[in-house]
Amino acid sequence: MRGERLAVAALAALLGLLLLAAWQASSALAPAGRGLPGPAAVARTAVEMLADPFYYRGPNDQGIGRQLAASLGRLAAGYAAASVAAIVLGVGLGLSPTLYRAVNPYVQVLKPISPLAWMPLFLYTIRDSGWAAVLVIFMSSLWPTLANTAFGVAGIRRDYLQVAAILQLPWWRRLATVILPAAAPAIVAGLRIAVGSAWVAIVAAEMLIGGTGIGYFVWNEWNNLALTSVIFAVLAIGLIGVLLDAGFARLARRLAWTE
């Protein structure tokens, strides 16, 4: 196993070097003003931006650390609210097949709607661009967790619920000791999908609302034709996404169980 991991790491490093070399060569060979900046130029910009990531020189000139913090704050607010709502609703739907069949048509209609399609309505009703972005995150996070929670609860072995009923456990103890632990792998899988969807949505939403956030930063730097900053911000967005996914993947491994 260790030898296999080393081989995978070496191959990944080799592929990374080849990609960087191809990128640098394409930027060097491109006509002036036509090619993208190469990795060397992006690296220099990255060093400059990371030297003082939290500076503030006005609303339109803030460090990338402040921009990422604003995006992660919106993500946390919308994602947490959606997760609580989705788990509560999902448990109810999973325990009641009749209720599930009654609600499912509405879920199927609402689920395919792009979260950004709700943005004009949110802006019109609450008249606050920051909270409108939070609600976009809420809508993008709700459906994966709701569907997985309902599926996980519906798949719980009836024996577990019958034993809890025989022991006359109050509903909150059934929920805490039987339902949620048994459905936890499915719930975490939904949370993992939802956080990826939410991170994608917040970047797009911030490009529309402006102000602060990594999405706005990318758009503002593009307007300034600072392509090295744009590329570095795109890489930072990808890295944050990987870290969020890795955290939920680790949680899923801890909660995995077999009978």
Image (cartoon, rainbow, N blue to C red):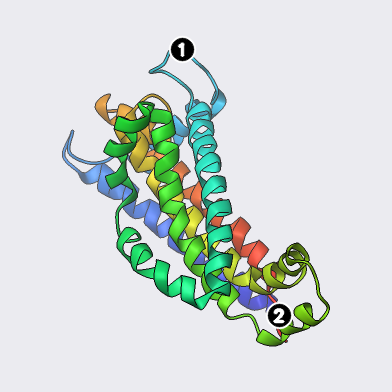
| Residue 30 on image: x %, y % | 19, 43
> Which image quadrant: the C terminus?
bottom right
Which residue bears the numbered disc 2?
A: 161
120 versus 63 height, above or below: below
Whether residue 1 is visible here, answered yes or no, is yes
Residue at the (70%, 84%) spot, across then down: 258
Whether residue 221 is visible here, answered yes or no, is no
- Picture quadrant where residue 232 is located: top left
196 versus 68 height, above or below: below
Q: Which mark is residue 215?
A: none
* Disc 2: CA contacts within 10 A as few (<14), some (14-19) or many (>=20): some
* Disc 1: CA contacts within 10 A as few (<14), some (14-19) or many (>=20): few
Q: Which mark is residue 57?
A: 1
Q: Nearer the viewer, mark 1 or mark 2?
A: 2
Residue at the (52%, 54%) spot, across then down: 242
Please state which amino acid type lies under the numbered disc 2: Leu
41 versus 199 height, above or below: above
Looking at the rendered structure, the secondary structure element under dot 2 is helix
Residue at the (43%, 54%) spot, across then down: 197
162 versus 116 height, above or below: below
| Residue 221 on image: x %, y % | 32, 28
Please state which amino acid type lies under the numbered disc 1: Arg
Q: Please give left or right for residue 195 compared with residue 163 in the image.
A: left
